[in-house]
């Protein structure tokens, strides 16, 4: 039995913070917390490779996971109420296509230290309500043209993006 199994009985739970609970291995019981609005799983779960357990959390508004070994954000596409996403230090992240459907997202932090493998940020260009964007440390990022469609953007941080040589695509903002 998962240590989180008893949590699934807390149907009114709206906030869950599991920061640094590294002994956890099965996030699946979280998927049964249908009222959850805020979830922090920073540095939690020693062995997880997917966000599919989040697909049932339709009320989720804030999600924070840091230092994750994930390569894809698949599983987030059903979290239509998500307003804030912090996927910090996710150096192995290559597929962010799932966030293109998160139309309510206003805050996105995908900063990382050097060594990030993310190159394609096309999906971010679909986030028309985005106001805050941190993409620092993505040293393979070359094309920021998708960001030109973010007309609501108020804050943009691209620091330490070593391969970035042109920002003229942002002149429309």
Image (tube, rainbow, N blue to C red):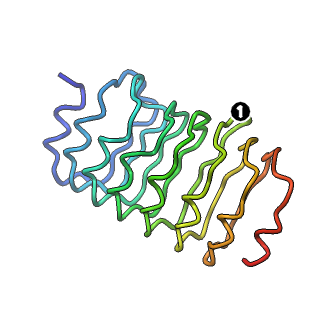
Q: Quadrant of residue 108?
A: bottom right
Task: Tell me which residue sits at (65%, 37%) in the image.
Answer: 117
- Residue 69 horizontal/vertical position (percent): 51, 30
Question: For this rendering, which residue is in front, 141 or 112?
Answer: 141
- Numbered disc total: 1
Q: Position of residue 79 (x, y in %)?
A: 34, 57
Residue 111 point in image, percent of width and height: 65, 47
Task: Name the quarter where the C terminus is drawn.
Answer: bottom right
Identify whether 31 is placed above or below 172.
Answer: above
Q: What's the residue at 51%, 36% (across, down)?
A: 71
Furthest residue in direction right, as rendered: 165
Q: Quadrant of the N terminus?
A: top left
Using the rendered view, name the quadrant where residue 134 is placed: bottom right
Q: Give the left or right position of residue 134, taking residue 57 as reference.
A: right
Q: Residue at x 63, y 73 (%)?
A: 149
The residue at 22%/36% (across/down) is 29
Q: Residues within 10 Å of mark 1 (few under 14, many from 20)?
A: some
Residue 74: give x, y in percent of width and height: 40, 45
Q: Secondary structure at mark 1?
A: loop
Q: Is residue 1 above or below residue 105?
A: above
Q: Is residue 110 left or right of residue 158?
A: left
Horizontal side of 40 relative to 152 (left or right) equals left
Reading the image, the residue beneath label 1 is 115
Q: Name the side, left or right, on which 88 lies relative to 156.
A: left
């Amino acid at each position: 039995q998962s240590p989180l199994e008893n949590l699934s009985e807390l149907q009114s739970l709206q906030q869950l913070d599991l920061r640094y609970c590294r002994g956890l291995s099965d996030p699946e019981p979280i998927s049964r917390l249908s009222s959850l609005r805020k979830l922090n799983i920073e540095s939690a779960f020693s062995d997880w490779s997917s966000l599919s357990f989040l697909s049932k959390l339709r009320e989720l508004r804030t999600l924070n996971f840091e230092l994750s070994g994930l390569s894809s954000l698949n599983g987030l596409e059903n979290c239509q109420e998500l307003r804030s996403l912090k996927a910090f230090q996710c150096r192995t992240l290559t597929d962010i296509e799932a966030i293109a459907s998160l139309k309510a997202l206003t805050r996105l932090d995908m900063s990382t230290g050097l060594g990030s493998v993310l190159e394609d940020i096309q999906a971010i260009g679909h986030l028309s309500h985005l106001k805050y964007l941190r993409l620092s440390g993505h040293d393979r990022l070359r094309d920021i043209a998708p960001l030109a469609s973010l007309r609501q953007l108020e804050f943009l941080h691209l620091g330490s993006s070593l391969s970035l040589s042109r920002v003229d695509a942002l002149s429309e903002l």
